[in-house]
Image (cartoon, helix red, strand yellow):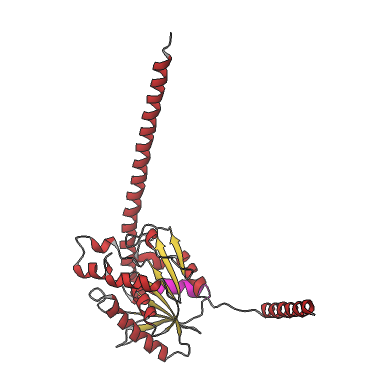
Amino acid sequence: MVDVNFTAVTCRVARVVTDAVYSILRTIVVVAKSVFAFTANIYNNIKDGLYHKLVYSYQAPQLPKGCNWVQMKPGFGNPIIYVHGRGALYSDSLPLFNCMADMGLNRPMYAVQVQNNTKLGIEDCAAQVSTAIEQILSESDDKEISLIGHSYGGLQVAEIALQGKFSVDQITTIGSPMQGTDAADCLLAPSIVQNNLGRHCEKIQDLNEKLKEASFKINHVISNWDFMVFPQEVMCSKATHKCYWYTGSHGHAGLVDDENIAQWIYDLHKVKKTSISTIIFDIGALAMATFLFFSLTD
């Protein structure tokens, strides 16, 4: 005769063991995927960074002698100005600007080279960019600008926009540590990196507080596997903040290479054209609303 109690206990034990084994295997798979993705990100970041320095630096327009900025693309309307990341080059903007121009953006695009930005704080780097912007605007009839900053450059464009010295329509940060980054706080990082990019950097905390009340539009591009920034830490506290969550294979340096990111930034910066039919429709709607208003009030 079968012992019912023994069978029930055996079934429960078997179920517990099976669930435990499943949980362990699932955890191993998740960890393995995370390690693989992180390793792939590091590899892609090194690969993209080397490609930038070996290819884009030769393809991009050269900086005029004694000048730290250059026009990457000609066009009409309000200038778009790009600021590169820490230890990077102005020419990193080339793939982004090429994509946006191919998509039909006809605004003038400029890139600024910040000297010694691996040794300077946010304010000192921003001062160099401000000088370049003054020179750019001196040659332009349009005084409103849009700023794009990759990585450390995103903190600099935020600083410039908040200073109120220029009329800024919007800023776009690409992989920028807007809350600081754990990568800067590691033991191997030099103290100057920890002071300028670490989680406890007072300047970054001050920027965050001021950005919460900013009147200009703020856009963030964040990668899910970016070792510099984590998605959940991006500040989107107001309607003026928009975020693009990037899930592609490019590493931190290669975010400016991705066509999907370029498409999103293009949509933010393209000139909104008003067609004749839209104008006629708006006038007709206004006339109809006026007619109905006076008809109802009689």
Rendered view: 23 above or below 56: above
| Total count of labels | 0
* Viewer-proximal residue among 2 and 274: 2
| Quadrant of image for the C terminus | bottom right
- Please give the range of residues in magenta: 94-104
Q: Is residue 85 visible?
A: no
Which residue lies at the image location 38% right of the left edge and 35% below the top edge? 22
In the image shown, does 124 or 117 lie closer to the viewer?
A: 124
**Residue 96 at x, y = what percent?**
43, 71
Q: In the rendering, at what x and y percent does residue 210 appear?
A: 37, 74
**Percent x, y of residue 225:** 36, 57
Q: Which quarter of the figure has residue 271?
A: bottom right
User: In the picture provided, is 133 more to the left or to the right than 66?
Assistant: right
Residue 58 in the image: state x and y as whole percent: 34, 76
Residue 18, picture quadrant: top left
Q: Is residue 65 magenta?
A: no
Q: Which image quadrant: the N terminus? A: top left
Residue at the top extreme, as displayed: 1
As drawn, which residue projects farthest toward the front? 298
Classified by dominant secondary structure, the portion drawn in magenta counts as: helix
* Residue at image coords 21%, 64%: 189
Along the line of sight, the residue nearer the viewer: 131 or 254: 131
**Residue 67 position (above or below residue 243):** below
Tell me if I can see residue 35 in this picture: yes
* Side of 71 where 67 appears, left or right: left
Q: Quadrant of residue 214?
A: bottom left
